[in-house]
Structure formats: structure tokens, C-alpha cells
Amino acid sequence: MEIRELTAQSCFIPGRVNIGLWKDGNGGCFLIDSGGDETSGRRLFKLLQEHNLTLHGIINTHSNADHIGGNAYLQKKTSCAIITSSLENVLTQNPYLEPFLLWGAYPFNAIRGKFLEAEPSKVTHVIHPGEMVPGTELEVVGLPGHFLNMVGLKSRDGVFYVADSVFSQEIIEKYRFIVSMDVEGVLRTLDMLQMSEANWFVPSHAKPVQNITSLVEANRKGVKYLSEAVLNLCKTPHSREEILAALAREWGIEMDSIQYVLNSATIAAYLSFLERKRCIVPYINEGYLLWKEKV
């Protein structure tokens, strides 16, 4: 692990999930997310010690396990604050709710574990868009779409930590199903990012960029591609499971149980999106919930 400075105060720690780091100028710091598990927490703790930085708090952009997994270890070691938005705070303190939410009931064993279910940590502050994070010069910015109530952080020195609002072109092409809970929210967030001014944009799953236009466009195209693929299948009645299976076969994507529930939830979000646009309608036939194009 290494700290890369974008400005004197606003930094990031590159990895599978980029972690933000904001320094207060007096030897203290705040992390923006904490990685996927206790190992991430241990490595972050060691890194901060090497740089003589005191951890005052972790600001979680949202409650997916790969963003809150280091919380418990770091909070135990430092008694740091855990800061996140409403709704996300509930899952941060009760992480079993993520696999519960994705499955729709008490989760089966294969979707439990660190990839969906982090160790719980105690949230000490709940933040809302438009506020400043206490003790920092970071403004909270709403980033709807990816999860329940995701937020980003914008520093006064021009660095915008944008969490999972955009993904790299490589990730979009590899996985196709980019996890979304609200497709309309995703598109609103992309529009907002397109209009935003910052010296640096720091996504969690792409390299930091000074101009976010190409990333926004790649993610818009990804939304359009998946929307059209789902709508095309609905020209004949299909269930959610049939749509997921058909697209996985077409794109050569193999899934384990965790990937299945994530992709299934994403397909559900796209079905809701297309239904709200009056493109498709649901109906029940012989015990199956089917979706067909509206004519």
C-alpha cells in the first residue's frame, strides 16, 4: 500500500478499491472507505503509522462490504469515528442485511462471508448531502443509483471522491452487469458528474482522472447497452431469471452464487426502470412473474 498525493491534503491509496485519504494538516486524517476485510484494515493501520498519521475517522461512501470491510479492525485499534449516510448506516452496523437485501430473505450460506457481509462497526455520525463532514473540509455529495444512499466527498482543494458512481471501461466490458439498485439514479448521477468541476475525480474502481467525461460516457453506454439487451429479450415474455441466464449465455459470463445475486438484483433494477418508462409490463402466468414489451 502507498499514499499518493493529489494535493497537500487530499490523497488516495490505490488498490482493488481506491481508498481516499484526507489530511487535516495537524497530523490527523480521515479515510474514505476502508477496503474489503480485516487484512485491509491491518494494512491501512500500518500505513498510517508509517506516515505518523492519527486516524480520526472513516467516512464510508456506502455499505458494500468491499468499502466497509476494514472498519471494525480500525475502529477497534484507534476508536475512530465511523461516518456514513442514512440507510447506509443501518447496513454498516448490521452487515448481514446486504446479502439479506440481495436475496430477499435470510441469506443462504454461499452468499454469506466477507465478499458480501463485512464485520459490523459502530456508526458514530450520520451525514447528509450538502453538509460538511465534521472535523474536515469535505462536502457530502449525493450519488444515487449504485446502492441505497451512496455519497461522495468533495474537498475544498478540488478533489472529488466519487465512490462507485463510475467504473472503468475495462470493468464494464468484463462484467457487463454493473451493480445498480436504481437506474434512473445512476443516470442522474452521471449527468451531475458531467457538470461537476473538480481538479481530480477519484472513483473507487477506476484510476483518478482530471476530466471525467470519458468515464461518464463509458458508463452511460453501459447503461444503454444493458437496457436495450433487457428490452430486446422482453419482446417475448421472460422472467427475471430467464433474462439473466440468457444474457450470461450470450456474453459468456460464468457466475458463482454471489455474482448471481448481485447480477439478479441489477436485472431487477433494469426491469423496474423499463417499467417506469412504460416500455415493459409485468404479469403473472402459471406462477411465474413474466415481463413483456408494452405494445
Image (spheres, rainbow, N blue to C red):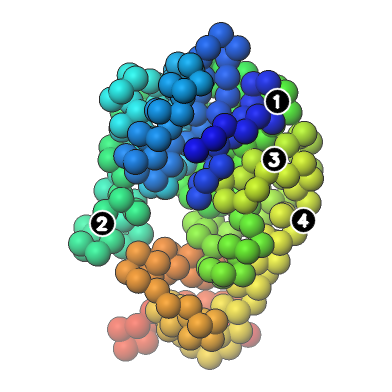
Residue type of the residue flagged with mark 3 = Phe
C-alpha gap between disc 1 and disc 4: 23 Å
Residue type of the residue flagged with mark 4 = Ser
Mark closest to the chain's N terminus, 4 or 3: 3
Mark closest to the chain's N terminus, 1 or 4: 1
C-alpha gap between disc 4 and disc 3: 12 Å
Q: Is residue 50 visible?
A: yes
Determine which residue is flagged by label 3.
201
Q: What is the secondary structure assignment of the residue under circle 3?
A: strand
C-alpha gap between disc 2 and disc 1: 39 Å
Coordinates of residue 142 in the picture (x, y in percent) = 59, 38
Q: Is residue 69 visible?
A: no
Q: Nearer the viewer, mark 3 or mark 1?
A: 1
Q: What is the secondary structure assignment of the residue under circle 1?
A: loop
Mark closest to the chain's N terminus, 2 or 1: 1
Q: Quadrant of the C terminus?
A: bottom right
Determine which residue is flagged by label 2.
112
Determine which residue is flagged by label 4.
214
C-alpha gap between disc 3 and disc 1: 12 Å
Is residue 106 left or right of 142 when viewed as pictured?
Answer: left
Q: Residue at x 64, y 57 (%)?
A: 168
Is residue 197 left or right of 250 when viewed as pictured?
Answer: right
Determine which residue is flagged by label 1.
7
Q: Relative to residue 133, is residue 217 depicted above or below? A: below
- The 10 Å Cα crowd at callout 3, few under 14, some 14 to 19, many 20 or more, is many
